Image (spheres, helix red, strand yellow):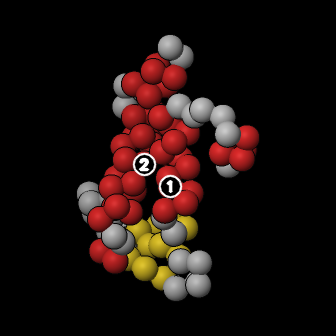
Amino acid sequence: MAAAQGGAKVDPIMALLSDVQTKLPVQWDKVDNAQDDPTVGTRFITQTGQEETYDKLSRSQKRVFRDYQLLQYDITAGKQYALKLDKK
């Protein structure tokens, strides 16, 4: 948010995080998420306080959510390609 306010250029990771912040409702995972599908058990809370499921997200929101999941995986359990690109 600070970079956007200051008009600074941002790297791809920061651009994705900005999209997550502006395009997705708040995410939370229910404990019963025992399946391999990361969208099962995931819930979102809209600005009006309504609970939504993954299926109710728009195509654009699903794309941002998937990109965010891939980034999280890469940084925590993957080969950390995103972190290596950030150092260039």
| Foreground tag (1 vs 2) | 1
Q: x and y percent of residue 67 in the render?
A: 37, 47
Could you tell me residue 80's position as x and y percent? 42, 26
Secondary structure beneath label 2: helix
Residue at the image point whose x is 55% and y is 60% from the top? 22
Residue at 51% of width from left, 23% of height from top? 86
Decide: few, some or many residues near mark 1? Use Cα within 10 Å; few <14, some 14-19, many ≥20.
Answer: some
Q: Is residue 21 above or below residue 72?
A: below
> Could you tell me which residue is drawn at 46 percent across and 19 percent down?
84
Mark 1–mark 2 Cα distance, whole angstroms, equals 7 Å
**Do we see residue 56 in this rendering?**
yes
Q: Residue furthest top?
A: 88
Residue to which mark 2 is pinned: 68
Task: Judge the density around disc 2: few (<14), some (14-19), many (≥20) Cα neighbours within 10 Å.
Answer: some
Quadrant housing residue 62: bottom left
Say which label, 1 or 2, has the lower sequence index: 1
Residue in view at x 53 percent, y 47 percent: 17
- Viewer-closest of 69 and 57: 57
Amino acid residing under circle 2? Tyr
**What amino acid is labelled 1 in the image?**
Val
Q: Nearer the viewer, residue 30 or 64?
A: 64
Q: Position of residue 1 (x, y in %)?
A: 67, 49
SS for dot 1: helix
Q: Are marks 1 and 2 in contact (CB under 8 Å)?
A: yes
Q: Is residue 25 left or right of residue 52?
A: right
**Residue at which label 1 appears:** 20
**Horizontal relation, residue 68 to residue 37: left or right:** right
